[in-house]
Image (cartoon, rainbow, N blue to C red):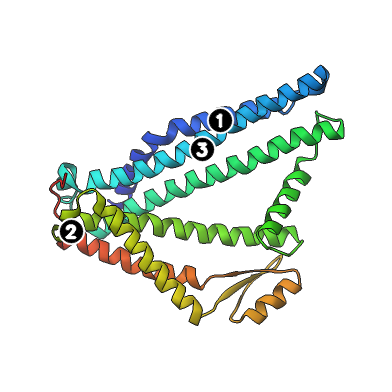
Amino acid sequence: MLGKLIKNSFKATANAVYVNYIIMGVIAVLMLILMFVDWTKWGAGGIATGFKIKLAASAILIITALVCVILTFVSVFGEFRRSMYGNEGQLTLTLPVRSSSLLFAKLFSGSFWVILSYTAFCLCAFGSVVYLLRHSMSVIEGDAEYLDTYNLVTEAIRQIAEAAGIATPNLKVILNLAGIHAFIGGIRACVFVLLVFFAITLANCRPFHKLSKIGPVLYFFAAIFIVHTLATVAAKFIKVFIVVSENAFTFALSEADVQLAWSNGYGAAAITNVYVTALLAVGMFLITALLIDRKVNVTPTT
């Protein structure tokens, strides 16, 4: 039954965003084709025209990805509110499954789509920058048909890492560290989705109906503030870091170990805030499931 719930939640969001992914795919193919055009054949005017065409394609790609992120948020949270509360919610809550299973299905599906849309947006933005740099550097190098894109991408990654304060010159360490931060970002996205679900659920509980549409917004920011404050306080007293080398991940419990790791060309990331946030999210999940079981009024509040 849980699998069917997750499948239905996936389909509900997919129906709202799949067109955007198709558009992004078509634009990406067009941009790939444009990479093999030698714009230098038409002189300076051709080079300028080629850059403008690629710039327009990149802008459309990024805008489409941004629209996809927005539609994903609207679809995920709108589908949760529609299917769990109101007229449709009356039917949903009569299903022979636990409220925790319903909530987990919505959370799993919603987190997947939010992470996917945000990842797609970041890749489109980063790829567009590299794409335009490649055109410019191809002209500078005098070879528009071939450029070592790998070196261009790796150099861009190094520059971004340097701007972010990552001192290590080792690309593999940078990529491993990026993987850690991507994992942390995934956890934060799941927590974000859960807190929105909690706010919507709380707004549909009888004691909290009075604030109507503004209620979920206030409850969400209140939940964010509480979770962030508790995680920040915990991070001040309990310091845990993960040290990243080329082939290993180890834990450190002091800033001195982190400084030593940086001096040896390794990377490090603080993870106390993340795991405390994850623990708080587990508690928030249980509270939300309990509210759905005992306090929720599925009658529409608007």
Position of 293 relative to 76 (above/below): below
- Alpha carbons under labels 3 and 2: distance apart: 36 Å
Mark 2: few/some/many CA within 10 Å (<14, 14-19, 20+): some
The amino acid pointed to by label 3 is Ala
Position of 78 relative to 105 (above/below): above
Q: Secondary structure at mark 1?
A: helix
Quick check: 25 left or right of 94?
Answer: right
Residue bearing mark 2 = 208
- Of the image marks 3 and 2, the number of the one nearer the N terminus: 3
| Label ID, residue 65 | 3
Q: Position of residue 149 (x, y in %)?
A: 76, 40
Tag 3–tag 2 contact (CB < 8 Å): no
Position of 223 relative to 96 (above/below): below
The quadrant holding residue 133 is: top right
Quick check: 281 left or right of 264?
Answer: left
Q: Secondary structure at mark 3?
A: helix
Q: Position of residue 231 (x, y in %)?
A: 43, 72
Q: Secondary structure at mark 2?
A: helix
Quick check: 90 left or right of 201?
Answer: left
As rendered, which of 91 and 168 lies closer to the eye?
Answer: 168
Q: Is residue 38 visible?
A: no
Residue bearing mark 1 = 60
The amino acid pointed to by label 2 is Phe
Give the residue at x 41% y 57%.
190
Give the residue at x 72% y 53%.
159
